[in-house]
Image (cartoon, grey):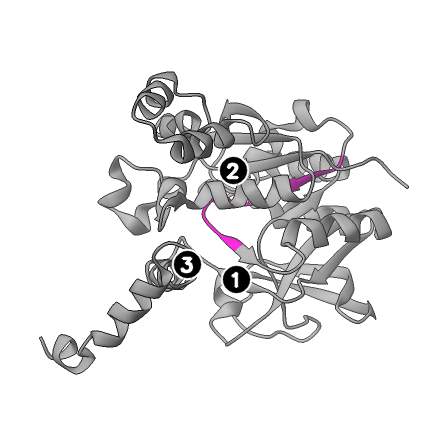
Amino acid sequence: MGKKITKALIPAAGFGTRFLPQTKAMPKEMMPLVDKPIIQRVVEELVEAGIETIVIVTGWHKRSIEDHFDNQFELEEKLFRSGKIKELEEVRKISDLAEFIYIRQKGPAGNATPVLNVRHIMKDEPFIVLWGDEFIDATPNRSQQLIDAYDKYQSLIIPGIKAQNDDWYKRYGIVGGDEIEPGVVRVSKIAEKPGNNRTGLSNLAAIGGFVGTSDIFGPLEEARLSLEEGTELVYTLGIQGMIDKGIPVHAIEIKNARYCDTGNKLEYLKTVVQYGLQHTEIGDDFRSYLKTLDLEAILSK
């Protein structure tokens, strides 16, 4: 058995341009799913899987993320004096979820830069990387499935979902390789947004982060040094670099999964509706309200 995974990285430095003007002042990761910001749901998933330390890589415009997971004594005092004990317990629980470390992103544009930024924190330990503006609902949860796969294969682990339509090949990385057991691929190639189902690739889309090992840092640094001007530094370059060096990489199909791309306007709205219907306090009333809507009248306006 290798080292236990206790650390996670959440990159959260992007500008969220797809949601402007909403994200001019509010980080996209803080957009609400009913009464919880997206990033809190990601954090809760990690904690449920046993993660103890969460490193969030931010930018100058993401201070509200740090505030959200911090103690807010004035708010807690106000809730206590108002007798709102349930709400008080809820806000206190947020700051106690894990040990949070914040660093500012430095380096070229791209989702691999935050990985290099935390090299000094992760050192030679395995760690989970999850994006702060998307998540996967699954049972067991995605992070637990990734940890279980790492414990078994002792390699970098990519979570995957089968491509649902041709558009997925334009939006996500796709893995190729040999299926060594049902739902598990020994990866020989990972293509970033290949555009179509190329020969040699599977239909498994690399979605929702990965379990990283220290083996990724060297190939990522090599990719950074050879990066062409105007090209983003993406994490798949590091993974492919590992594969090219003969370092094992596996991809697993996440079981019982529903992907929530909350960085996309339409998918965000769908997710909000679903979580509204599932909400213990308002779900029944929301369902009743939706049934009263005259969709034909609304769509005709």
Which residue carries the number 2 mark?
Answer: 11
Residue at x-position 55% and y-position 27%:
96
Disc 1 secondary structure class: strand
- Which is in the foreground here, disc 3 or disc 2? 3
Residue in the foreground of this view, choosing between 169 and 219: 169
Specify the label residue 259 is tagged with.
1
Q: Which residue appears farthest toward the bottom when viewing the image?
A: 296
Give x and y (percent) for residue 258: 54, 65
Q: Considering only order in the chain, which callout, 1 or 2, is on the residue closer to the N terminus?
A: 2
Q: Which residue is mark 3?
A: 275
Q: Is residue 103 visible?
A: yes
On the image, the x and y values in percent for residue 212 come to: 70, 42
**Quarter where residue 261 is shown:** bottom left
**Residue 132: mark:** none
Q: Is residue 82 left or right of residue 141?
A: left
> CB under 8 Å between callouts 3 and 1?
no
User: Mark 3 to mark 1: distance in Å?
Assistant: 13 Å
Is disc 2 placed on a helix, strand or loop?
strand
70 and 180: which one is in front?
70
In the image as oriented, which residue stretches furthest toward the left? Answer: 301
Label 3, label 2: how far apart the Cα atoms are: 24 Å
